Image (tube, grey):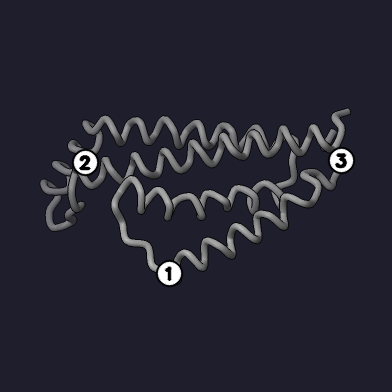
Amino acid sequence: MLSKISLRAKTLAMVAIMVSCSCTGDILLSKGMKQVGEVSFNSFGALASTFLQIIGNGRVWLAILFLSLYTLSYIVVLSWADYSYVQPVAAIGYAIVPLLGYLVLGESVTMLRWAGVAFICLGVLLITRTQPRTTEPLP
């Protein structure tokens, strides 16, 4: 059986991979959809044309790849750590997204949003001080 320290390290490493893939996928999806433009529901033809632009956009496909890797890493980490640990720790992604939005996408982030980011970081810090698994694995 793994010691609690190695379980924590393994879990935090996998959550870091999860969050990296999620944030990268989200940024790529945002950039890809900004290239495509606003989705119009005015007519079936306009919607079909937009759909073709979406499936022809390389950034969207790269985003799908990263978001798929996020899902796979999420599945893996949930095989050994509690959901009640993984999900709150992965919320650090919510703190990284505004930073990436500001740095990569040139978005404006208000002080109120940064205050929210600070609260998220504090919550993640508190959760990481607990054990990743509080239950025994299912048979």
Position of residue 106 measured from the top left corner of the image (x, y, whole percent): 29, 52
Position of residue 9 measured from the top left corner of the image (x, y, whole percent): 73, 35
Q: Earlier in the sequence, mark 2 or mark 3?
A: 2
Between marks 3 and 1, how big is the CA–CA gap?
Answer: 43 Å
Secondary element under disc 1, as helix, strand or loop, is: helix
Q: Are marks 2 and 1 in contact (CB under 8 Å)?
A: no
Q: Nearer the viewer, residue 135 or 59?
A: 59
Q: Earlier in the sequence, mark 3 or mark 1?
A: 1
Between marks 2 and 3, how big is the CA–CA gap?
Answer: 46 Å
Position of residue 67 measured from the top left corner of the image (x, y, whole percent): 45, 37
Q: Which mark is residue 51?
A: 2
Image quarter (top left, top right, bottom left or bottom right) of the C terminus:
top right
22 on left or right of 36: right
Q: Residue at x 45, y 71 (%)?
A: 112
Q: Which of label 2 and label 3 is nearer to you?
A: 3
Q: Residue at x 41, y 30 (%)?
A: 65
Secondary element under disc 3, as helix, strand or loop, is: loop
Q: Residues within 10 Å of mark 3 (few under 14, many from 20)?
A: few
Q: Is residue 22 above or below residue 87?
A: above
Between marks 2 and 1, how big is the CA–CA gap?
Answer: 36 Å
Residue under label 3, please give it.
136
Residue under label 1, please give it.
111
Q: Nearer the viewer, residue 100 or 60?
A: 100
Q: Amino acid at mark 3?
A: Glu
Q: Nearer the viewer, residue 43 or 89?
A: 89
Q: Residue at x 17, y 54 (%)?
A: 40
Secondary element under disc 2, as helix, strand or loop, is: helix
